[in-house]
Amino acid sequence: MAFREKGSAIIIKTPEQIEGIRRSAQLAASALKEVAPYVKAGVTTEFLNNICRDFIKDHGAVAATVGYNGYKHETCISLNDVICHGIPGKYTLRDGDILNIDVTTILNGYYGDTSTMFTVGEITEHAQKLINATRECLRIGIAQCRPGNRVGNIGYEINKYATSLGYSVVYEFCGHGVGIRFHEEPEVSHVADKDTGPVMQAGMIFTIEPMINAGKARAKVDKRDGWTARTIDGKLSAQFEHTILVTPTRPDVLSDISNEYPKP
Ligand code: MF3
Ligand code: CO
Ligand code: CO
């Protein structure tokens, strides 16, 4: 996330809100599924954005990013050393590229936010390992979601795992409460001290969206466009994001449409 509304309490969602947010998150995930077959060498990132744009529109939703603090596109597409907030444009995909596509939908007023990694042609083993580790970081974070546990333990466990593999965790961008607005409380850092932060309760909905770097953790935002966040050392970065509901039993991954996560 880029800008957070501070000082507001964490919203406990009603059953009606939960179902609305679930539908929106599933639509966002469906847009990523729709675009997947188009991710190939020779296409521009703008073309991929437009596939998502049309899909979202055709399903009666709008992209939350359009007009958000001046952002103009329906997706963020972050390639290789871009950590997040990559702007879709004229760049043509090449063999060996790795990219994250991030979609946030507003459907019937409810926000759903998810992103995933794509690969172009043959990628290096180094890149594949980073992607696999980042997917695992998200899974580890989600496994911390239960009432009574503290939000900080999400970042604590993610950071512990990522650094054990020699990777670093981006601390300048975080997950966030989501659903009624784009960026709600709580802030979900992917690096945190054990047993810190707000206590989770059933009915909370937030994203977990770890950005994991092959090299140094620091991010540098492009001065010319004001958005594109890159690694400072030019090394690769990967990210996965889900929208998650805390329930009394297991976490409900609202943006999971491929049954990767068991339902509560
Ligand atoms: N979808 C991003 C997130 O996960 C936010 C993108 S904001 C934008 O929080 F303006 F860059 F699009
Ligand atoms: Co998000
Ligand atoms: Co997102």
Image (cartoon, rainbow, N blue to C red):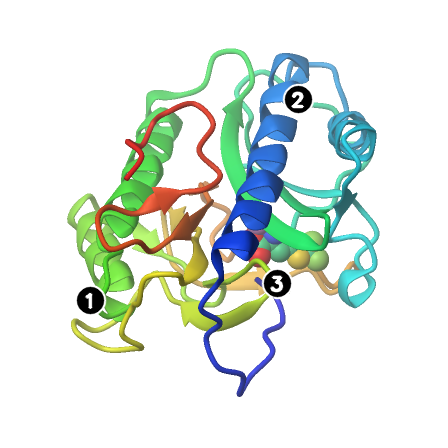
Precedes in sequence: disc 2 or disc 1: 2
Precedes in sequence: disc 1 or disc 3: 1
- Which residue is the site of mark 2? 35
User: Quick one: label 2, few (<14), some, or many (20+) residues within 10 Å?
Assistant: some
Q: CA distance from mark 1 to mark 3?
A: 23 Å
User: Residue placed at 19% from the left, 49% from the top?
Assistant: 161
User: Quick one: label 3, few (<14), some, or many (20+) residues within 10 Å?
Assistant: some
Of residue 124 and residue 86, the one placed in the foreground of this image is 86
Residue 159 lies, with reference to residue 241, above or below; the image says below
In the displayed structure, does residue 34 sit left or right of residue 8? right
Q: Is mark 2 within 8 Å of ligand 3?
A: no
Of residue 260 and residue 124, the one placed in the foreground of this image is 260
User: Quick one: label 1, few (<14), some, or many (20+) residues within 10 Å?
Assistant: some
Q: Residue furthest bottom?
A: 7
User: Residue placed at 39% from the left, 61% from the top?
Assistant: 203
- Which residue is the site of mark 3? 180
- Which residue is the site of mark 1? 149
Q: Name the kind of residue labelled 3 in the image.
A: Ile
Query: Residue 183: where, in percent of width, then height?
Result: 59, 66
| Front label number (1 vs 3) | 3
Q: Name the kind of residue labelled 2 in the image.
A: Val
